[in-house]
Amino acid sequence: MSNTLTKTDYNFPGQKSVYKGKVRDVYAFEDDKLVMIASDRLSAFDVVMPKGIPFKGQILNQIATKMMNDTQDIVPNWLQATPDPNVAVGEACEPFKVEMVIRGYLSGHAAREYKAGKRMLCGVAMPEGMKENDRFPEPIITPATKAEMGDHDEDISKEDILKRGIVSAEDYAVLEDYTQKLFQRGTEIAAKRGLILVDTKYEFGKTKDGKIVLIDEIHTPDSSRYFYANTYEELQEKGEPQKQLSKEFVRQWLIQNGFQGKEGQEVPVMSDEYIESVSERYIELYENITGEKFEKAEVSNIEKRVEENVLAYLK
């Protein structure tokens, strides 16, 4: 098994605080810089799995960096540099407390809700007569509140977001506009790779001078679901599951092994072979999504490599 980065505990010069998320650790600095380290932690059903996945952090960080560069002409983002394969550095922002989820197809959580008989998701109507993985007439935005570590993100409607004052109406209009633009661009990028961008989520923050920017990750297999375009129609017609590029294969494995993040459920043990297979799937995702060969970073001592690269950058 390769060495993995599952926790970080740095004390960089000028560092003032650390926030540890499910997958990323964010170090804040006195000069309004943020250093975001993508770990190899794997989270599913809002639970962090006991073992890390080799190269996962590098994969997520490099896809997000590439996609931020490929969309910065339409939506501003927080990113300034990537001094290490697992690290992104950018401008400190006040994050909005909602995730902007956008869905082009009836898949994943939306499909589970639809099967349960619901026809409204986050205040948005879903048409009658759809089957799983059918395309929506228009992409729908189904926001979620951002949960603290260990809690579940929750569906919320635009009306509730505005009523509860989570986001102002003026800012929310910008978030919606940016979400639609990014999804459109992501769809075009995916199509060039023979993929369909099915659904994804975006997170935004506000800089200290009041500018709304894209933060965190974008179009990665952790935040997005992709189908292969060449088999989509045929599989839909046959009513068969779509061949997909996303973290859904891990969720399905967990469901089959009796785990959905519900109270009293134990996380099933992932064997080294299974962990290795998940790592290989992530590499396949990277190569398909970016169209580039994945170059494995040096992992004999990831903690030290990350620390040295960040320190060199800060100097």
Image: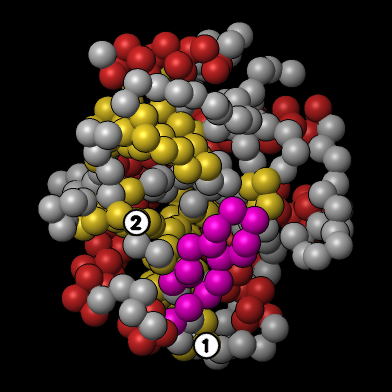
What is the quadrant of the N terminus in the image? Answer: top right
Q: Look at mark 2 in the image and give the residue it sits on.
A: 95
Q: Look at mark 1 in the image and give the residue it sits on.
A: 120
Residue 107 seen in render: no
Tell me the magenta residue range. Answer: 143-157
Q: Which mark is residue 228?
A: none
> Which of the two residues, 196 or 92, is positioned nearer the viewer here?
92
**Dominant secondary structure (helix, strand or loop) of the stretch shown in magenta:** loop
Secondary structure under badge 1? strand
Disc 2 marks a residue whose amino acid type is: Pro
What is the quadrant of the C terminus in the image? Answer: top left
Taking the spot 45% from the left edge, 23% from the top edge, the residue there is 11
Pointer 1 and pointer 2: residues touching (CB < 8 Å)?
no
Taking the spot 47% from the left edge, 43% from the top edge, the residue there is 19
> Which of the two residues, 36 or 237, is positioned nearer the viewer here?
36
Disc 1 marks a residue whose amino acid type is: Met
> Which of the two residues, 35 or 43, is positioned nearer the viewer here?
35
Marks 1 and 2: which is nearer the front?
2
Mark 1, Cα crowd under 10 Å, few <14 / some 14-19 / many 20+, is some
Taking the spot 85% from the left edge, 59% from the top edge, the residue there is 265
Q: Indicate which disc, 1 or 2, sits on the residue closer to the N terminus.
A: 2
Taking the image as shown, residue 57 lies to the left or right of residue 274, namely left
Percent x, y of residue 80: 23, 33
Percent x, y of residue 23: 55, 41
Mark 2, Cα crowd under 10 Å, few <14 / some 14-19 / many 20+, is some
